[in-house]
Image (cartoon, rainbow, N blue to C red):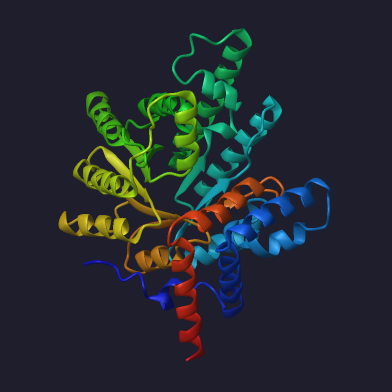
């Protein structure tokens, strides 16, 4: 039976009237592309010039999409979500670091999130971005092969492997599943290879390491099938976080500029169709695949709900999870959890200045994704009107 995602009383019961009003005005602002572009410029300049705008950012867009500046500051968000039967995935959202000292520090922070997850049943997963623990250039240069790396580059690559293994081993030792986020296609082969190595090593009894499969790429459904074959051949489990993906324009532009085949699906329908086929494939192979459906799409959420019901599966089966980003699509998250399904929210955190790239992407995404902001606004308006009686 399909979930009714228009139930705003359930969707926003975690927000008081003041929080709901703030969310309304934030989405109202990000619905205007000109204002978002100006805000991006103004916030970036203000932080570079050390102008006193941190408090404003933290009270507005930061509090909507982030849990805090450190793990401890996320405590109230974790509790609020847990009170509504929604898990937390702590996401340390620093980007663009290039020194080994910074990359080692990020690795240690990711390990801290795994340790926190072990100590708190409200945190079912951990997560990290490979570009957060490696120089981007190394991921890119090793995408096809590591054979072309010089001595210094090879040393940096081995440090990346060491950091990734350290994270995955900690996850394995503590029994905390860890998501490895997907990234740009020109570094994804490097990430895929490492995820497969880690899954072979640590997923013998259960899915500890989860790779991320971006279905806006036309080749990913076949890749998912090869992963399943690998699982059966090696007698291991495969963890898969299914997403549609972002950065479509960047991917298309680079493919055109470099003269290679566009890796992106021809249109949204093709992406949606492959996403839903991937859901069905994972459920059909649940004996070796654990799945997290990372999606802000109501139809796909109900596709998985229907598959779970058709197969007579338990909604609380930990091999089946839904996930959305903090501050977005609460109508999906909370209505799913209210109906007994496993749901978690990505909760990004980190120093305000460091998470600005993430915040800017969220603002731009809500501006550009067709219907996203309009849907959020209409639901918030509906709930505000309901509360006024």
Residue 297 quadrant: bottom left
Q: Quadrant of the N terminus?
A: bottom left
**Which residue sits at x=44%, y=50%?**
124
The residue under the point 45% across, 30% down is 256
Q: Nearer the viewer, residue 318 or 248?
A: 248
Q: Nearer the viewer, residue 43 or 155?
A: 43
Q: Residue at x 69, y 26 (%)?
A: 99
Looking at the rendered structure, the number of numbered marks drawn on it comes to 0
Q: Position of residue 44 (x, y in %)?
A: 73, 48
155 relative to 7, above or below: above
The x and y percentages for residue 206 are: 33, 38
Name of the residue lying farthest toward the bottom: 389
Tell me if residue 108 can be seen.
Answer: yes
Relative side of 198 to 132, left or right: left
Between 350 and 221, which is closer to the camera in this rendering? Answer: 221
Q: Is residue 129 left or right of residue 209?
A: right
- Is 136 or 172 nearer to us in this picture? 136
Give residue 193's position: percent from left, percent from top. 41, 24
Residue 206 visible in the shown view? no
Up-down relation of residue 349 to residue 14 (above or below): above
Residue 75 x, y percent position in the rendering: 60, 59
Which residue shows up at 67% across the image and 52% down it?
40
Left or right: where 271 falls relative to 164:
left
């Amino acid at each position: 039976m399909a979930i009714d995602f228009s139930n705003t009383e359930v969707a926003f019961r975690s927000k008081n009237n003041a929080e709901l009003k703030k969310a309304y005005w934030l989405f109202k602002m990000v619905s205007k592309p000109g204002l978002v572009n100006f805000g991006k410029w103004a916030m970036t300049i203000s932080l570079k010039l050390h102008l006193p705008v941190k408090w404003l950012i933290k009270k507005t867009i930061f509090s909507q999409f982030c849990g805090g500046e450190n793990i401890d500051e996320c405590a109230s968000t974790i509790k609020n979500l847990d009170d509504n039967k929604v898990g937390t995935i702590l996401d340390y959202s620093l980007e663009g670091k290039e020194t080994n000292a910074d990359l080692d520090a990020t690795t240690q922070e990711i390990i801290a999130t795994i340790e926190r997850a072990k100590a708190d049943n409200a945190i079912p997963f951990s997560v990290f971005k490979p570009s957060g623990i490696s120089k981007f250039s190394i991921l890119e240069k090793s995408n096809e092969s590591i054979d072309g790396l010089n001595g210094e580059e090879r040393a940096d690559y081995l440090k990346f492997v060491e950091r990734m293994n350290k994270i995955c081993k900690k996850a394995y030792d503590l029994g905390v599943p860890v998501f490895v986020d997907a990234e740009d296609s020109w570094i994804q082969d490097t990430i895929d290879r490492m995820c497969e190595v880690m899954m072979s090593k640590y997923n013998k009894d259960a899915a500890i390491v989860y790779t991320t499969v971006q279905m806006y790429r036309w080749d990913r459904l076949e890749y998912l099938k090869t992963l399943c074959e690998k699982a059966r051949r090696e007698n291991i489990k495969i963890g898969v976080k299914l997403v549609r993906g972002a950065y479509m324009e960047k991917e298309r532009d680079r493919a055109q500029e470099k003269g290679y085949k566009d890796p992106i699906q021809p249109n949204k329908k093709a992406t949606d169709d492959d996403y839903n086929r991937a859901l069905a494939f994972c459920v059909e192979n649940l004996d070796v695949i654990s799945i997290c459906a990372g999606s802000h799409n109501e139809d796909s959420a109900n596709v998985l709900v229907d598959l779970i019901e058709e197969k007579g599966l338990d909604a609380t089966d930990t091999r089946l999870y839904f996930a959305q980003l903090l501050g977005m699509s609460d109508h999906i998250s909370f209505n799913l959890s209210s109906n007994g399904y496993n749901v978690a929210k990505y909760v990004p955190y980190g120093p305000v200045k460091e998470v600005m790239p993430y915040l800017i992407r969220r603002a731009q995404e809500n501006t550009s994704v067709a219907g996203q902001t309009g849907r959020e606004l209409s639901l918030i308006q509906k709930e505000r009107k309901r509360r006024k009686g």
